[in-house]
């Protein structure tokens, strides 16, 4: 069974969500403080962590920062509706997606499934094949490994999915809707800045093209394009 | 430069110009009047000697001797007039001058510029010297021309001094108008930016070292802006906190609904949860309303006389009921009789909030102590509520009466919204009292409420109830 770690300070809410998710077929462990959650998450036995941003003491954002220092496990953030600053900070720190609170448990469950699906089940018939090569970038989707000019690049699972989608279509623009489907596992919502934030952190992690430009280019009204040299 | 500047400038300048014009005209008119008063009869001291010698000649030598003298010597005309207004030399003379001379004679026999001489033949002559022409229209006067070095002094209108005065007043009016208009301009700009929501105080700086009513006005504006800013920040924070606080019960509500959908067979327990959450939301809204009413100063009937001991005892009795269930104790020590004027319901809720709060933080087996006592120095009653909880970190002490402040341990417990102490504080302040909190040396937090009492309060025998 897939293990889910729920980190939220609202004990009653966590209880109910736990019940719901367990009924939905997940194995849920709850933590009510950032420190406890971090410790649990770092044991490596969880497929995904659901993290509340607003927590007393060590906040969700701080927990995420510490988690990302040593783990690339998928993280779904629970943010307050309308609090864009928290959301963007979270995405920049490497959260895979967010759900705004209050949310229905069904939506939460669906989001968890979407992230898990693209992270762990996107590998059909894992035959070790030749890597995907675009310029200085080499990707091994089966091993979820990427290199830039021979150096390993650390990517979160969402970033990896987005980069894979761009690499498979290198040299032509990929629309944001398509990126959202492939990277986040859900259709693009209106005013969703999610993709932009992820791509901006991808640009930071990857090097520049030979002419000094960023290897990922924004194509006006069409989406993003990985430069094929 | 704004319209105000021009208004100030023009009115000040016009006033000054009018004053200059009035003063100049005054001086000019006075000059003219004096010239007219002395008229055509020369009253200067120099004429006295000539008149004396002419009078002596006429008196002793007769009319002919005077004629000879006048023909020979007088380069300035000296007239001798008989009763019929005929001059001894038959010179023509302006009758007005003659009339003036006669009038001067009548007014004052000893006027130095006119002599009356009666000759041996019984003829009476009037002797005087007319002044040389000083103004146009003084009338024709025959006689030897005045010497070239003698210049008449005309009474000119003072044009040049007036021009200088006008320029000076122009400059001073401009300076004065600028002095008035500048601070008003900076005030206006501050108001303008305030109306767009920018309440940064800045007028005081623009006033510089100015110390007058306008500068005070600017500083008052700054104070007002700063106060408004802090109030608005508070409101914004409150709104943010309220929406956040609303979200937690709503999230639980949605989770409970989701559970009910997922497992229809357990709908009963889900409905129970849904009910609990909706009651919580209702409580939160009720507390928010109370808080906002207190903030707005809507406190209802404040005229009742309330026995503080009774209210506190009621609250303690209620609290004991709950405390028993949690294996906690509430002690009451009341050794006075204190009456306060105010709203019993609000006070009850304020004490209840503080006592419940104390109970919440006190661990199992612990106890909360409530004490009512009169203050020694002033007519105030002190209600002290001490718990055995973890206390509050000193740096957070000023915050505990703010809405939505909650201690770390209170947050994870879902009871309470962090509004109880804020309501208590506002209630006590509405009763002109004060509330403060301090950590106990041993362990726990003490909240002290101080209220002004009515009239003389009797000290009672210490009655301890447990």
Image: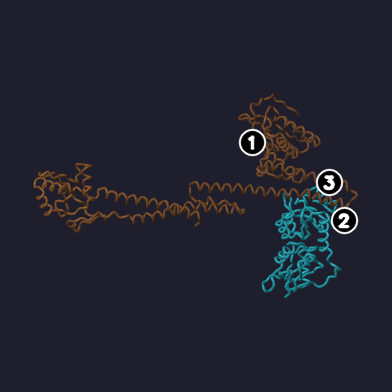
SS at circle 1: loop
How many numbered marks, from 0 up? 3
Label 2 resides on the chain identified as A
Residue B46, visible in the rendered structure: no
In the rendered structure, find residue B65 and report the number of the disc placed on it. none
Furthest residue toward right = B265
Q: Do circles 1 and 3 both sit on a common chain?
A: yes
SS at circle 3: helix
Label 2 CA crowd tier, 10 Å (few <14, some 14–19, many 20+) = few
SS at circle 2: loop
In the rendered structure, find residue A25 and report the number of the disc placed on it. 2
Q: Quadrant of residue A118?
A: bottom right
In the rendered image, the quadrant that contains the N terminus of chain A is bottom right
Q: Colour of chain A?
A: cyan
In the rendered image, the quadrant that contains the C terminus of chain A is bottom right
Q: Position of residue B449 (x, y in %)?
A: 67, 35
Is A198 in front, or is B196?
B196
Label 3 resides on the chain identified as B
Q: Position of residue B267 (x, y in %)?
A: 88, 48
Label 3 CA crowd tier, 10 Å (few <14, some 14–19, many 20+) = some
Q: Do circles 1 and 2 both sit on a common chain?
A: no
- Colour pattern of the rendering: by chain
**Chain in brown colour:** B
- What residue is pinned by disc 3? B273
Q: Residue at coordinates 59% horizontally, 48% vertically from top-left?
A: B226
Q: CA distance from mark 1 to mark 2?
A: 60 Å
- What residue is pinned by disc 1? B432
Is B227 in front, or is A168?
B227
Say left or right for A95 vs B181: right
From the image, state whether disc 3 or disc 2 is nearer to you.
Answer: 3
């Amino acid at each position: 069974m897939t293990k889910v770690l729920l980190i939220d300070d609202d004990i009653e809410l966590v209880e109910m969500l736990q019940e719901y998710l367990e009924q939905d077929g997940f194995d849920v462990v709850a933590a009510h403080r950032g420190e406890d959650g971090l410790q649990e998450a770092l044991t490596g036995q969880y497929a995904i962590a659901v993290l509340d941003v607003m927590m007393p003491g060590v906040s969700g954002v701080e927990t995420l920062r510490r988690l990302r220092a040593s783990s690339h496990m998928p993280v779904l953030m629970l943010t307050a509706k309308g609090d864009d600053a928290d959301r963007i900070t979270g995405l920049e720190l490497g959260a895979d997606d967010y759900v705004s609170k209050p949310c229905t448990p069904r939506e939460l469950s669906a989001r968890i499934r979407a992230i898990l699906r693209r992270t762990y089940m996107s590998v059909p018939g894992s035959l070790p094949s030749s890597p995907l090569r675009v310029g200085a970038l080499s990707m091994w989707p089966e091993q979820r490994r990427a290199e830039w000019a021979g150096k390993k690049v650390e990517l979160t699972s969402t970033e990896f999915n987005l980069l894979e989608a761009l690499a498979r279509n290198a040299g032509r623009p990929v629309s944001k809707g398509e990126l959202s489907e492939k990277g986040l596992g859900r259709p693009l919502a209106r005013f969703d800045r999610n993709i932009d934030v992820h791509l901006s952190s991808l640009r930071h992690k990857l090097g520049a093209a030979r002419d000094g430009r960023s290897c990922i280019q924004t194509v006006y009204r069409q989406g993003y394009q990985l430069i094929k040299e | 430069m704004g319209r105000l500047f021009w208004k100030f400038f023009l009115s000040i300048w016009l006033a000054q110009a009018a004053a200059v014009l009035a003063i100049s005209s005054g001086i000019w008119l006075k000059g003219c009047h004096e010239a007219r008063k002395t008229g055509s009869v020369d009253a200067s001291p120099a004429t006295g000697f000539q008149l004396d010698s002419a009078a002596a000649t006429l008196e002793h030598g007769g009319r002919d001797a005077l004629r000879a003298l006048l023909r020979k010597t007088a380069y300035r005309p000296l007239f001798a007039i008989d009763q019929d207004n005929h001059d001894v030399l038959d010179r023509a003379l302006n009758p007005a001058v003659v009339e003036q001379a006669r009038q001067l004679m009548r007014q004052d026999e000893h006027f130095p510029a006119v002599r009356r001489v009666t000759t041996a033949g019984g003829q009476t002559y009037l002797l005087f010297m007319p002044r040389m022409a000083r103004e146009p229209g003084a009338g024709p006067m025959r006689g030897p021309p005045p010497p070239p070095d003698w210049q008449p002094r005309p009474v000119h209108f003072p044009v040049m001094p007036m021009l200088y005065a006008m320029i000076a007043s122009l400059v001073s009016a401009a300076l004065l108008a600028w002095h008035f208009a500048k601070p008003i301009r900076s005030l206006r700009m501050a108001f303008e930016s305030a109306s767009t929501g920018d309440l940064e105080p800045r007028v005081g700086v623009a006033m510089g070292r100015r110390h007058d009513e306008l500068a005070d006005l600017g500083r008052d504006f700054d104070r007002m802006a700063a106060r408004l800013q802090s109030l608005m920040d508070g409101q914004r924070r409150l709104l943010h906190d309220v929406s956040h606080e609303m979200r937690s019960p709503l999230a639980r509500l949605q989770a409970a609904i989701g559970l009910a959908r997922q497992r229809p067979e357990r709908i009963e327990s889900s409905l129970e949860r849904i009910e609990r959450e909706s009651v919580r939301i209702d409580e939160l809204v009720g507390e928010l309303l109370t808080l906002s009413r207190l903030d707005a100063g809507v406190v209802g009937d404040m005229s009742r006389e309330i026995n503080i001991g009774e209210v506190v005892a009621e609250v303690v009795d209620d609290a004991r009921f709950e405390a028993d269930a949690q294996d906690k104790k509430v002690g009451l020590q009341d050794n006075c009789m204190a009456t306060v004027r105010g709203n019993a319901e609000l006070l009850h809720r304020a004490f209840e909030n503080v006592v419940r709060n104390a109970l919440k933080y006190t661990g199992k087996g612990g106890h909360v102590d409530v004490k009512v006592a009169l203050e020694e120095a002033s007519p105030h009653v002190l209600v002290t509520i001490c718990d055995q909880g973890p206390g509050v970190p000193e740096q957070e002490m000023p915050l505990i009466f703010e809405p939505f402040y909650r201690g770390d341990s209170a947050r994870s417990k879902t009871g309470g919204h962090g509004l109880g102490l804020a309501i208590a504080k506002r209630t006590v302040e509405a009763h002109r009292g004060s509330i403060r909190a301090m950590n106990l040396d041993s362990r726990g937090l003490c909240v002290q409420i101080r209220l002004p009492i009515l009239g003389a309060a009797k000290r009672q025998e210490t009655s301890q109830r447990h």
